[in-house]
Amino acid sequence: MLAQSLFSELFGRAPLPGREIVCVQGLGFVGAAMATAIAAARDPDGSPRFDVIGVELDNPRGRERVNKINAGSFPFSSPDRKLNEAVEVASRTKNIVATTNANAFGLARIAIVDVNLDVESVNGAAPQVDFTGFKEAMRTLGHELPAGSLVIVETTVPPGTCENIVAPVLREELVRRGMPDDAILLAHSYERVMPGPDYFDSVVNFWRVYAGHNDEAAARCEEFLTRVINVQKFPLRRLGSMTASEAAKVLENSYRAINIAFIDEWSRLAEAAGIDLYEVIDAIRMRPTHNNMREPGFGVGGYCLPKDPLFAPAAAAIFFKDKQIDFPFSRLAVDVNSRMPLANLDRIDGALGGLKNKSIMVLGVAYRSEVDDTRSAPAETFCREAIRRGALVACHDPYVRHWSELDLAVSDTLPDPSSADVVVFAVPHRAYRELDVLPWLRDAKPLLYDCDNVLSGQMRSKLRAAGIQVESAGRGMGL
Ligand SMILES: NC(=O)c1ccc[n+]([C@@H]2O[C@H](COP(=O)([O-])OP(=O)(O)OC[C@H]3O[C@@H](n4cnc5c(N)ncnc54)[C@H](O)[C@@H]3O)[C@@H](O)[C@H]2O)c1
């Protein structure tokens, strides 16, 4: 009865027979997109398959995310029209709502976990995972979810977390409630969501891996994913255990982080040897076995790649008590990637003959193109160090209005470059790739430093013909 009235309070109507209720725990970059994708799933007659409730923490950030969804808008700035429209439509048809009331889990047939989990390694020490908030989130589920519901963990975790932490916490809470300790089913399936222009499709039109605590959980997870994801084109992949599914996510991201870090030393060599590493990599990528080689860049940011490789050593130490596996590649990748912005800064420092009192204009502070996410952005490391060396830093980003990490207002109109000593093309936002640089510069002739292949070869030649020095990460001087 209580649950019925909470449903009516949230949706303004009674539950519909046959329409499953899904709760998404955590409305961050992943949870908000997943909630939207679930709400957008339709039966052949066009009616929504699910009623979706996004559940957040009752704090200023949580409330802001809840209010945005309830107002029919996606909580983050995104150029993806499909995603923005899907939230608006679901909000209009009233099959998505958001709340900070954790009692809402009492309504759910399925709960998707998209909360954050941090791992940190200070000065190369053993990575530490703080499970406090994550465990609390699992405890809430165990306390609230009805018998027969299914939990799908999407959060990236050290392999072994579902078996060693989530399952015991759920069991404990169920026993406390006087229920059978297996009354809730548990599965793991990780997101490959990619914020940016294809944000929505990166959830719905993309391959998925999953595994269950037992066969029933795996089958229920598969059934759910089949109703949300375009599995005809992107078949699901079931693994033998939840630990294997967790390991797949961590290995997948570690592989990419290591690939990026490996190219960094070659970028330095290319710069010293006076060659164009982009050209070299293009030639190598012709080999099908090498077609995913990474390229020189500004650095690695966002919530995943800078931290995920550390989950492997963390898992070995916490769950498998194996101190022999050292994961040198994973650790080194995290370290190299975090220092990459400084390698770019050092080169600019050298080209300008020092940074003291030099004006640096940074174009792009988000961690990647077409997103407003500044978490662990390379621009943060770059700007902090530039300021420390005495430079005056101005920033622009088409998506970021307030850079929370630096507590800085960021302009959305391209600043006047006339007083800049160097303009750094840091992020390949479309606005910069399509910028006609010469008219924008007018008479100014700052050094232009391209960290991420933002300027085409044609543009670089045009600028040089106008007497402007253009340099790039991964290319020798003047290339
Ligand atoms: N960002 C990506 O592109 C991406 C891609 C794939 C996987 N992932 C993984 O997905 C997970 C979530 O990432 P994110 O970028 O969305 O993180 P995020 O920090 O943006 O969002 C997490 C949200 O969970 C909320 N939360 C925490 N505890 C809660 C609780 N008990 N109840 C309700 N809400 C709670 C937080 O308030 C926050 O809003 C992470 O494990 C991440 O590694 C991220």
Image (cartoon, rainbow, N blue to C red):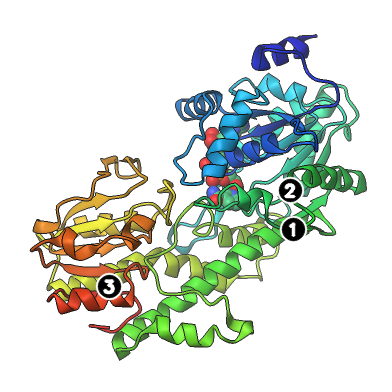
Q: CA distance from mark 3 to mark 1?
A: 39 Å
Dot 1: what SS? loop
| 306 lies above or below 294 | above
Residue at 54 percent of width and 27 percent of height: 72
For the residue with label 3, is its CB less than 8 Å from the closest atom of ligand 1?
A: no
Dot 3, how many residues are within 10 Å of its Cα: few (below 14), some (14-19), or many (20+)? Answer: some
Q: CA distance from mark 2 to mark 1?
A: 8 Å
Dot 2, how many residues are within 10 Å of its Cα: few (below 14), some (14-19), or many (20+)? Answer: many
Where is mark 1, residue-wise? 234
- Percent position (x, y) of residue 16? 80, 20
Closest to the observer, 289 or 141: 289
For the residue with label 2, is its CB less than 8 Å from the closest atom of ligand 1?
A: no
| 90 lies above or below 454 | above
Where is mark 2, residue-wise? 229
Q: Amino acid at mark 2?
A: Ile
Q: How many marks?
A: 3
Dot 1, how many residues are within 10 Å of its Cα: few (below 14), some (14-19), or many (20+)? Answer: some
Residue at 15 percent of width and 61 percent of height: 441
- Percent position (x, y) of residue 100? 58, 22
- Mark 2 vs 3, N-terminal side: 2
Mark on residue 459?
3
- Percent position (x, y) of residue 170? 78, 34
Labels 2 and 1 touching (C-beta < 8 A): yes
Q: Amino acid at mark 3?
A: Met
Give left or right: position of 383 versus 180: left
Residue at 44 percent of width and 87 percent of height: 280
Dot 2: what SS? loop
Write down which quadrant ligand 1 falls in: top right
| 172 lies above or below 100 | below
